[in-house]
Amino acid sequence: EVPLVESGGGWVQPGGSLRLSCTASGFTFSHYHMNWLRQAPGKGPEWLAGINTGGDRTIYAHSVKGRFTISRDNGNNTAYLQMTRLKPEDTALYFCARRDPNYSDYDVRGQGTQVTVSA
């Protein structure tokens, strides 16, 4: 069983929107902070957004603040990333990662979903 599975990626024109989902299984989802990251070809991972266990606190990277919104539904074991005003430079593999509040590093990440932004 794969603990984190992303979905919702695809192709979108510049200025468009997508909503990504990260579905968790096999662990107590509400016990973990959740994060979204992305990795473009030839580049290292870029952290985008984080949300705390209860879903009432969020934080964003400067590159996506005001355009992306992270949220979670603990009842459905799912985290989301709503992306708006997408740009070609947002093209990347997007993945979610969990972090135990007692530790500073992610210990599980999903395999990712591809987002391509082009005309």
Image: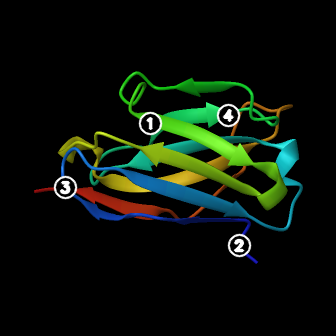
Residue 10: x percent and y percent?
34, 66
Query: Which SS class for mark 1?
Result: strand
Indicate which disc, 4 or 1, sits on the residue closer to the N terminus.
Answer: 4
Q: Residue at x 81, y 43 (%)?
A: 32
Give the quadrant of residue 15. Answer: top left
Indicate which disc, 2 or 1, sits on the residue closer to the N terminus.
Answer: 2
Q: Mark 2 points at which residue?
A: 2
C-alpha distance separating marks 4 and 1: 12 Å
Asked if the residue at tag 2 contacts the one at tag 3, i.e. Cβ–Cβ closer than 8 Å, the answer is: no
Q: Name the residue under label 4.
A: 51
C-alpha distance separating marks 4 and 3: 27 Å
Dot 2 crowding, Cα within 10 Å, few <14, some 14–19, many 20+: few
Q: Which amino acid does label 1 sit on?
A: Phe
Dot 1 crowding, Cα within 10 Å, few <14, some 14–19, many 20+: many
Residue 68: mark in rendering: 1
C-alpha distance separating marks 1 and 3: 16 Å
- Looking at the picture, does residue 16 appear above or below residue 5? above
- Which label lies toward us, 2 or 1? 1
Indicate which disc, 2 or 4, sits on the residue closer to the N terminus.
Answer: 2
C-alpha distance separating marks 3 and 2: 31 Å
106 to the left or right of 48: right
Q: Name the residue under label 3.
A: 13
Query: Which SS class for mark 2?
Result: loop
Q: What residue type is labelled 2?
A: Val
- Which label lies toward us, 4 or 1? 1
- Which label lies toward us, 4 or 3? 3
- Looking at the picture, does residue 54 appear above or below residue 30? above
